[in-house]
Image: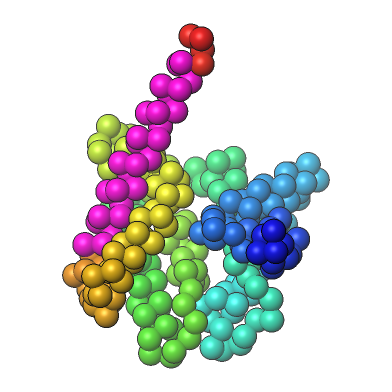
Amino acid sequence: PKEFEQYINQFSFLDLIYYGTGTSGYQLWFLTALIWSVIILFVFLKLKKVKFLLIISLILNLLGLFGQSYSMFYDFPLSTRDALFIGLFYTTLGFFFAYNKFFEKSKSITNKTYLLLIFIFFTVQVVEGYLLDKVLSGSHGEYFISTIFLTVFLFLFALNNKTLGKDLFITKVGGRALGIYIVHVVFINIFDLILSAVKMKQISDNLFLKLFETLLIISMSYISYDLLQYFKERLSKLIKTS
């Protein structure tokens, strides 16, 4: 009981309800960010101020980058891995992709141009992340200014090629992306425990081991999630027939 009380007391209301941190599901912070972002978007949609929200959320996103990737230039005093600084902008941007006719004009751009732009901004993002993290010794971040452009061109390319990849295996994997992401932390921990047990923790940063680990964890996560879905369907059928 004492240990349980200490475990509960370490959480704050903001941690659990807003940030989605402080639990074993720390990697699922984006779910609470998505929930709050959708609520805010709904309010602005009712007020017919979504364009205004897109501008505000973009400004907040740029400010939030100083709490992530660009903290070496200015250390933002608030935690920005949340709905307000990260989730809101991308959720609102997604709304515009779905409902705003402005993006229909993008159909005049060729696929070759889209692929070139995607390659350019993907490369810029990789270089930007490396320079900020390794060369300038900044904090590790997942979002950059280049991420905005990369996201826009990826979505536009996908929207203009809706049948691309249909029935391919990679598409099946993509359809299970959320489930794979939810369970993959379990296999990361198992892999780390195995390395520790065989006293090979010192080679955990080896490039080839990392590549093998990535492939193994994705495969195991995919298989385990598929099994979970299979047993869920079987259980559902048993309940219906009983």
Find residue 127 and report its horizontal and vertical position in percent: 35, 77
Q: Quadrant of residue 101?
A: top right
> Is residue 220 covered in magenta?
yes
How does the figure colour the protein chain or chains? rainbow
Instruction: Relative to 40, say whether 131 is above or below.
Output: below
The reply to whether residue 155 is visible in this rendering is no
Find residue 105 and report its horizontal and vertical position in percent: 48, 46
Which segment is the magenta one?
212-238
Q: Along the horizontal axis of the image, is 84 left or right of 241?
A: right
User: Dominant secondary structure of the magenta stretch?
Assistant: helix
User: What residue appears at the point 73 percent right and 44 percent down from the top-left corner?
Assistant: 42
Of all residues, the one furthest to the right in this rendering is 47
Q: Along the horizontal axis of the image, is 52 left or right of 151?
A: right
Find residue 159 and report its horizontal and vertical position in percent: 42, 42
Quadrant (top left/top right/bottom left/bottom right) for the N terminus: bottom right
Q: Quadrant of residue 66?
A: bottom right
Q: Quadrant of residue 7?
A: bottom right
Q: Along the horizontal axis of the image, is 220 left or right of 88?
A: left
Of all residues, the one furthest to the left in this rendering is 208
The foreground one among 61 and 195 is 195
User: What residue appears at the point 46 percent right and 77 percent down from the top-left corner?
Assistant: 140
The foreground one among 85 and 177 is 177
User: What residue appears at the point 56 percent right and 83 percent down from the top-left corner?
Assistant: 71
The foreground one among 160 and 140 is 140
The reply to whether residue 218 is visible in this rendering is yes
Of all residues, the one furthest to the front in this rendering is 1
Instruction: Relative to 150, say whether 141 is above or below.
Output: below
Q: Along the horizontal axis of the image, is 115 left or right of 34?
A: left
Find residue 92 and report its horizontal and vertical position in percent: 62, 52
> Is residue 55 covered in magenta?
no
Instruction: Relative to 157, say whether 196 is above or below.
Output: below
User: What residue appears at the point 30 percent right and 55 percent down from the top-left corner?
Assistant: 217
